[in-house]
Amino acid sequence: MTDDDYEAELARLQTALVDAQIWSQAEGKKVCIVFEGRDSAGKDGVIKRITEHLSVRQTRVMALPKPSDREKTQWWFQRYAAHLPAAGEWAIFNRSWYNRAGVEKVMGFSTPHEQEIFLRDVASFESMLADSDIVLIKFWLDISKDEQKERLDDRRSDPLKRLKVSPLDAVAQEKWDAYSAARDEMLRRSHHATGHWTCVKTDKKKKARLNTIRHVLHAIGCPDYTVSVETPDPEVVFSYDAVIEGKQALFK
């Protein structure tokens, strides 16, 4: 795909995103999109393309900092529930309540007991969201170890990407296997009827962005778009069911 082809298709899909938000406002739909994935898998990039032309009043992106001392004593889901969408709103989480089963597990920021309680309760929490008519879309962005290394090295050498550099970047490669194990357990135990996971292979950034947006457009349920919206490429975007059935594999 050339840069011109990519930009033209992105513009078409962004037009459809505007259609979808106009419809969701009119219908009072509540949309919640969760982006999880390894460091440098492209969460910031795809969120930027999704929100670029949406209403700033009706679209909120949450990338919450580490919990305060007070928040550490709260019910785990409490700080996230405060940011859930009202009618007509889209709430996009750049990392979410799944921190407890990912980063916190690998880095030891919470106890095994707290992690187990989270995995026990998360399906019930998300079922409550569905019962409240929230459209929940969960993405796991997957990236290969070699591609992650290249992107992390690029971050450190590019002065314009300094704000993306995190202390956790230093251990992303070192703890690759631990992150893989945490990912596999998290996806397996939190993939359920009202909160199923959609996996995205992100080594090819442009393909990943376009196909992720296509999935969002189909998942939201808008009945009519002013442009055609293709179904996502199943080699790029696929349900975690395909992993369970052995039809797809995540990077090890």
Image: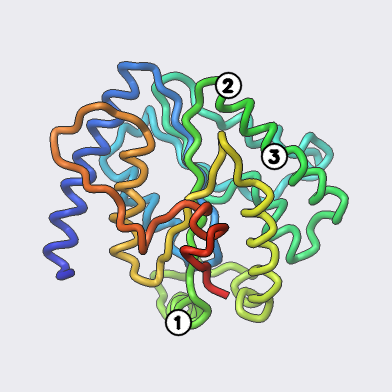
Q: Nearer the viewer, residue 135 or 184?
A: 184
43 versus 132 height, above or below: below
The residue positioned 13% from the left and 55% from the top of the image is 8
Q: Measured from the top left, where is residue 191 in percent x and y?
A: 60, 46
Q: Amino acid at mark 2?
A: Asp
Q: Measured from the top left, where is residue 230 in percent x and y?
A: 22, 47
Quickly name the residue at label 3: 122
Q: Quadrant of the C terminus?
A: bottom right
Q: Earlier in the sequence, mark 1 or mark 3?
A: 3
Q: CA distance from mark 3 to mark 2?
A: 14 Å
Q: CA distance from mark 1 to mark 3?
A: 34 Å
Label 2: state its secondary structure: helix
Q: Amino acid at mark 3?
A: Val
Quickly name the residue at label 2: 131
Q: Do the residues bearing badges 3 and 2 touch, measured as CB atoms within 8 Å?
A: no
The residue positioned 56% from the left and 34% from the top of the image is 194
Say few, some or many: other residues with alpha carbon within 10 Å of mark 1 (under 14 / 14 to 19 / 20 or more).
Answer: few
Task: Choose top left, top right, bottom left or bottom right for residue 236.
Answer: bottom left
Residue 55 lies left or right of residue 247; in this view the side is left
Q: Nearer the viewer, mark 1 or mark 3?
A: 3
Residue 228 lies left or right of residue 215; in this view the side is left
